[in-house]
Amino acid sequence: MNGQVRLLEGGELHQAVIHDGLLSAQQWVWIATADLKDMHVQIDRAFVPILEQFDRMAQRGVRFRIVHSALPSRPFRATLEGFKALTGGGLELQICPRCHWKLVLVDGRFAYCGSANFTGAGLGAKNIHKRNLELGLVTEDAAWVARLTAIFDRFWIGAHCQACKLRAACPDPIS
């Protein structure tokens, strides 16, 4: 995939984003999504919560940053509470009611940008006949990955917060 941007859909998108990209992380994973759920992925023959995989990765030192449009769902938060590597500093979460991005960035070498939220119907292991119809671009092209990483990073440090007209609706605006 080096040097090119690929447009994918359905099972190809799931494989590329989750298995080839995200689960291969060695240092960090940054996710931006408007909808975040207790998603499951297929590992070997079992379907497991993605947070279980994240926790294993966090134990190896992989760090996660997630930007989400609202407080994640109750089931997601309940599952998250059981993973001590994540709740002990492996995962940082920012809430922004304006976030509608769908991005996954991995180690500064892989990027996904597309329509799929971080849910079972979007990027998870939901049955192919029940999954949302999603499109997304994936790449390992250094220029594309750097550009998307810079956009995410500017958000993370609060570049949009000061002038945001929805600041009062934000649970924890960045100063």
Image (spheres, grey):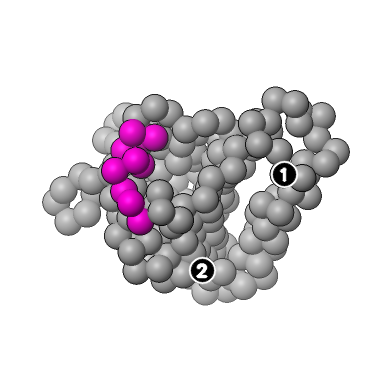
- Circle 1 is placed at which residue position? 174
| Magenta stretch, residue numbers | 76-85
Q: Identify the amino acid type marked 2.
A: Asp
Q: Nearer the viewer, residue 153 or 13?
A: 153
Q: Is residue 120 above or below residue 114?
A: above
Q: Residues within 10 Å of mark 1 (few under 14, many from 20)?
A: some
Residue 133 visible (yes or no):
no
In the picture as drawn, the residue positioned furthest to the front comes out as: 88
> Please, what is the dominant secondary structure of the magenta stretch?
helix
Question: Which residue sits at x=51%, y=68%?
Answer: 107
| Left/right of residue 18 with respect to residue 1 in the rendered view | left
Mark 2 = which residue? 107
Across and down, in percent, residue 10 comes to 39, 43
Q: Is residue 3 left or right of residue 157?
A: left
Q: Quadrant of residue 77?
A: top left
**Residue depicted at x 20% and y 45%:** 47
Regarding mark 1 in the picture, which secondary structure is present there?
loop
Residue 171: x %, y % from top left? 64, 31
Instruction: Judge left or right: residue 76 versus residue 137.
Output: left
